[in-house]
Image (cartoon, rainbow, N blue to C red):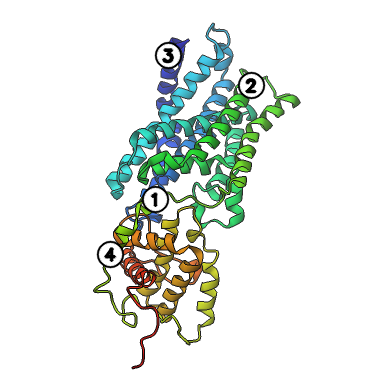
């Protein structure tokens, strides 16, 4: 059985690389997505590091929704699987060989993306290569089982494209794969809980840029196991040897079982509060900040609050806020980048709002900075906020930064390096007020 599996996998690979269409879909399409992401996220720092999980998920998803079922259905139409049935090799060995070949094909495409991202855009190599390999195999297993279900439902190759698009596009658009989960509305984030693409991103991305890798991704790993097991079981039971076979009404129960894995995963995620985006970058560093680290921070050489750089309105200002600033303050209450599961990153993102207003020379930049400070004090308890602000000061290059916030009415896209600099200044000003080093009341007229 092992020999048959290896021979069949080798045969599938040779046939794949002889097909011009397979080369285009398997390698040119992933290259297109890499260049597209590179053009959209070129200003992120480091470039594309925060999007590699999305890129690899798209590649795996394409192999599952299109590559695998297209190959199976095309072979079934040519009578290949009918001939295989006459051999003494059991079906599990043949299917395993086909799946193994597809994993190799997708893995080569993913390796190409990682290498080209590094060479073209300077994206760092994965921080946890072995964990990435394990997570990659798990995601492949979860998605390729779905490919078997698509192959069973499709009567011909054009049907594969139609069914595949019905799965591929929703996960790309509202499933947290193509469009980052953090920018989706709340209803879409809830819906994404029922789609495996979201969990794939959450297990692949930490392997690139989280200090502890998959340590905090246990729920997403479990969801992929549930989804993959349900799809693989259903796909194996529904496998068709010949074009003359048709699904019977009772067979659709297995189709329902495959998607029941999605429902179970979504139900568990929603009940556990796992709805919003999970931004794992910097979580460990934030947790390690202690009082001794905070005490080592000095507050000299900060620009004055009424100066040109990093201005900050007084605590008890009687200035009347414009309707535009009042609207921005209301939007801060529900702003998605400040509502992730990572407290440190939430604080950094809110600081970026003040930094963007400062760099963009908004007329009310000082009032916006004061509004951000007040938002921070309301949203986090004092100990959390003190440590998170200290993390921003002590590790200015950690985590990610927001460089544009049009949803808050702020214009322009700013340089990531300057946003980090101004965010650090504001973090110091806010932290100094929390620890009492910088007075937060207007100076006495005397």
Question: Mark 2 highlights which residue?
Answer: 237
Residue 189 picture location, percent across and down: 57, 52
Q: Earlier in the sequence, mark 3 or mark 2?
A: 3
Secondary structure beneath disc 3?
helix
Q: Residue at x 47, y 72 (%)?
A: 374
Q: CA distance from mark 3 to mark 1?
A: 43 Å
Q: CA distance from mark 3 to mark 4?
A: 63 Å
Q: Residue at x 24, y 74 (%)?
A: 301
Q: CA distance from mark 1 to mark 2?
A: 41 Å
Question: Mark 3 highlights which residue?
Answer: 7
Q: Is residue 163 visible?
A: yes
**Labels 1, 2: front one:** 1
Secondary structure beneath disc 4?
loop
Q: Nearer the viewer, residue 64 or 71?
A: 64
* Screen quadrant of the C terminus: bottom left
Rendering quarter of residue 246:
top right
Q: CA distance from mark 4 to mark 2?
A: 63 Å
Question: Mark 1 highlights which residue?
Answer: 281
Q: Nearer the viewer, residue 73 or 372?
A: 372
Name above or below for residue 425 compared with residue 26. Answer: below
Q: CA distance from mark 4 to mark 1?
A: 23 Å
Check disc 3: other Cα within 10 Å, few if <14, some if 14-19, many if 20+: some
């Amino acid at each position: 059985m092992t020999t048959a599996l290896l021979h069949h996998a080798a045969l599938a690979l040779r046939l794949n690389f002889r097909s011009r269409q397979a080369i285009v879909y398997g390698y040119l399409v992933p290259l297109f997505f890499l260049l597209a992401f590179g053009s959209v996220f070129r200003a992120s720092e480091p470039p594309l590091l925060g999007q590699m999980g999305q890129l690899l998920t798209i590649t795996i998803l394409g192999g599952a929704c299109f590559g695998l079922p297209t190959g199976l259905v095309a072979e079934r139409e040519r009578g290949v699987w009918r001939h295989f049935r006459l051999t003494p090799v059991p079906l599990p060995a043949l299917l395993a060989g086909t799946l193994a070949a597809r994993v190799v094909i997708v893995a080569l495409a993913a390796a190409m993306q990682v290498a080209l991202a590094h060479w073209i855009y300077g994206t760092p190599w994965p921080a946890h290569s072995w964990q990435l390999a394990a997570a990659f195999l798990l995601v492949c297993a979860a998605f390729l089982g779905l490919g078997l279900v698509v192959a069973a439902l499709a009567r011909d190759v054009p049907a594969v494209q139609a069914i595949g698009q019905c799965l591929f596009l929703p996960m790309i658009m509202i499933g947290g794969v193509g469009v980052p989960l953090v920018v989706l509305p709340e209803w879409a984030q809830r819906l994404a809980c029922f789609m495996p693409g979201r969990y794939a991103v959450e297990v692949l991305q930490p392997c690139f840029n989280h200090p502890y890798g998959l340590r905090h991704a246990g729920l997403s790993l479990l969801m992929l196991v549930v989804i993959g097991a349900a799809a693989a079981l259903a796909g194996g039971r529904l496998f068709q040897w010949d074009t003359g076979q048709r699904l019977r009404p009772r067979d659709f129960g297995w189709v329902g079982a495959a998607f029941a894995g999605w429902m179970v995963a979504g139900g568990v995620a929603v009940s556990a509060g796992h709805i919003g985006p999970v931004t794992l970058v910097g979580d460990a560093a934030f947790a390690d900040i202690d009082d001794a680290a905070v005490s080592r921070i000095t507050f000299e050489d900060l620009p004055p609050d009424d100066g040109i750089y990093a201005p900050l309105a007084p605590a008890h200002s009687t200035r009347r806020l414009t309707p535009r600033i009042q609207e921005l303050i209301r939007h801060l209450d529900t702003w998605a980048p400040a509502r992730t599961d990572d407290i440190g990153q939430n604080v950094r993102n809110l600081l970026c709002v003040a930094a963007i207003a400062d760099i963009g020379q908004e007329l009310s930049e000082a009032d916006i900075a004061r509004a951000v400070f007040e938002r921070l004090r309301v949203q986090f308890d004092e100990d959390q906020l003190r440590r998170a602000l200290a993390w921003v000061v002590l590790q200015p290059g950690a985590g990610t930064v927001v460089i544009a916030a049009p949803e808050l009415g702020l214009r322009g896209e700013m340089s990531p390096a300057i946003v980090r600099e101004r965010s650090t200044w504001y973090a110091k000003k806010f932290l100094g007020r929390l620890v009492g080093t910088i007075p937060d009341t207007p100076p006495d007229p005397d």
